Image (cartoon, rainbow, N blue to C red):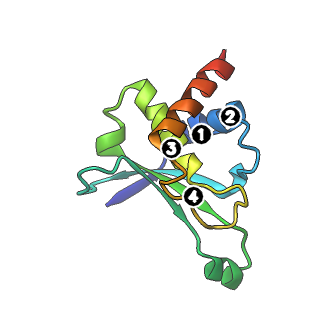
Amino acid sequence: MKYEKADDIRKLGLDIIEKLNLNYIDINNVFFFRSYGSKTRRVIARCHSMSKILQLALCRKAIYVIEIISEKYDKLNEKEKIKTIIHELMHIPKCFGGGFRHHNLVSRNYVNKMYKKYLKNKV
């Protein structure tokens, strides 16, 4: 696997955070990477975090990494790319503590609702 910083994804992520008023997300502690060479069949992107014990050991606040699987994500149309980033950002809980919001809270319907809100606020 190869990883590189994804400034284009970061720019989109910042725009989404702003337009959807996701003020609880500390953008200084969210990083965006593009990976190459994944063998995954279904995954387009992943959200990673630093566990609480690592935060304590390293005297750091929570850190989240949004990983985009290049082979899947780069083929998507613009709408699906935006929805994918919304989906991954929705996994970050409001406490921004290192945990995750699971898929029972990050549903397709909720992502679609947030996508419509994003488009409305983009104008």
Q: Residue at x 68, y 22 (%)?
A: 121
Please state which of the two labelled residues, at mark 1 or mark 2, is closer to the viewer: 2
Q: Residues within 10 Å of mark 1 (few under 14, many from 20)?
A: many
Q: Is residue 40 left or right of residue 85?
A: left
Which residue is label 4 attached to?
A: 101
Label 1 to label 2: alpha-carbon separation? 10 Å
Q: How many residues crowd mark 3 within 10 Å: few (<14), some (14–19), many (20+)?
A: many
Relative horizontal placement of residue 89, taking residue 109 as reference (left or right): right
Task: Give the quadrant of residue 12.
Answer: top right
User: Which disc, if any, is residue 13?
Assistant: 1
What quarter of the picture does the C terminus occupy? top right
Residue 87: numbered disc? 3
Mark 3 or mark 1, which has the lower sequence index? 1
Label 1 vs 4, first from the N-terminus: 1
Residue kind at label 3, given as amino acid type = His
From mark 4 to mark 3, how far is it between C-alphas? 10 Å
Measuring from the top left, give residue 59's x and y in whole percent: 74, 79
| Residue holding disc 2 | 20
Crowding near the residue tagged with mark 4, few <14, some 14–19, many ≥20 C-alpha atoms within 10 Å: some
Give residue 57's quadrant in the image.
bottom right
Q: Amino acid at mark 2?
A: Leu
What residue lies at 51% left-to-right and 58% top-to-bottom?
Answer: 102
Q: Nearer the viewer, residue 121 or 3?
A: 121
Where residue 116 appears, as percent x and y from the top left, is: 57, 24
Q: Residue at x 29, y 44 (%)?
A: 71
- CA gap between label 2 and label 3 equals 12 Å
